[in-house]
Image (tube, grey):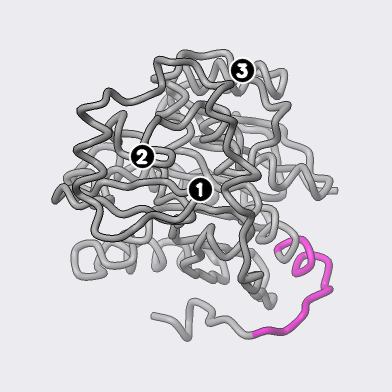
Amino acid sequence: MYKTIDLFSGIGGIRLGFERHGCTNVFSSEWDRYARQMYEVNFGEKPFGDINDIDPSDIPDHDILLAGFPCQPFSIAGKGLGFEDTRGTLFFNIAEILKNKQPKAFLLENVKRLTTHDSGRTFRIILETLKQLGYTVYFKVLNTLDFGLPQKRERIYIVGFSDNIPFYFPEPINKYRSLSELLENDQDVEPSYFLSDVLKQKRLAALKKAPPTPSIWHENIGGNVSALPYSCALRAGGSYNYLVVNGVRRLTGREMLRLQGFPDDFKINIPYSQVRKVAGNSVSVPVIEAIAENMLASLSGKVEQKGQLNLLEAI
């Protein structure tokens, strides 16, 4: 139906959401070698490397640009340097590609904190840049927990169209799958995933109330432990014990991919330490799939009006 390109592709979560609606990807780019290995084994193509080495004119023509551009410069977990961080300037690589190739639409994804970084200045620069390129822009923070997956993960999604056409973000479905559907049986998990007795007792002692079953226990930066019927956001740089299943073991690689909405036939061909990283950097596929459906409806003129601010109304 439409041709896409997949920039800062990670392991291909955004691409997957659009392919489920019939889109065909014609180019991908990712610098992390482990993400590239996993992308290649699942999609049959190896992404181009560093986006700084790409001449925009060499990128194939496409209809929709997709990019989960690096979030570390704007993340609470990072140093929050924004455009002072080299990775933060990679947004302008996207802008150059939009200027050169002029696709019909784009979808950008980043951390929620992008909207408030530097008192909102960073986000205003991004929106103004997109506006100057001639795009009608929409944005909204969506939570994975509202789209069927047991993971609290808030991300900002920015959608743009070269024409002034209406677009509405998908409505939350307000329910999510039980962890019991995603978690593996403990007896099927290798012993290396289980915590020592000392760590288990430490976590248990830090709990303030009885945990639900099943649950994922989360330890925040202050050392407080909470046990929830869903997972807190997967993080690429989280400690091995950042998220713990029922207080006794770490998440397996397959469980992390399930929490992001990847199917069980999605192949894992990299070490566990790298699966943690790529899963934490990935997007939640059902959220992307819902946005993709509405974007394609807008492009085809079939829009259900549910109300969402556009760029001119929102800044």
Disc marking residue 170: none
Which residue in the protein does label 2 denote?
A: 247
Q: In which quarter of the image is residue 162?
A: bottom right
Q: Name the residue under label 1.
A: 214
Tell me if residue 32 is in the magenta stretch: no
Q: Mark 3 points at which residue?
A: 46
As measured in the structure, the alpha-carbon distance from the residue carrying label 2 to the one carrying label 3 is: 38 Å
Which element carries disc 1, helix, strand or loop? loop
Amino acid, disc 3: Lys
Residue 95 position, x and y percent, is: 46, 50
Span colored in magenta:
295-306
Q: In the image, what residue occupies the spot 58% across and 81% down?
A: 308
Instruction: Report the residue at 60% width, 39% height from top.
Output: 258
Side (left or right) of 227 relative to 264: left
Q: Which amino acid does label 1 sit on?
A: Pro
Q: Check the picture and name the quadrant holding the C terminus.
A: bottom left
Which quadrant would residue 128 be assigned to in this image? bottom left
| Residue 313 pos. (x, y %) | 47, 86
> Which residue is rendered at x = 69% and y = 46% of the image?
17
Tell me if I can see residue 81 in this picture.
no
Kindly identify the amino acid type of the residue bearing the numbered disc 2.
Gly
**What kind of element bears circle 2?**
loop
Can residue 239 be seen here? The reply is: yes
Neighbourhood count class around disc 3 (C-alpha, 10 Å): few under 14, some 14–19, many 20 upward: some
| Viewer-proximal residue among 69 and 129 | 69
Cα distance in 3D space between marks 1 and 3: 38 Å
Give the answer, above or below, for where 67 lies relative to 53.
Answer: below
Residues at marks 1 and 2, CA–CA distance in whole angstroms = 10 Å
Question: How many neighbours does mark 1 have within 10 angstroms: few (below 14), some (14-19), or many (20 or more)?
Answer: some
Q: In this view, does 242 lie to the left or right of 169?
A: left
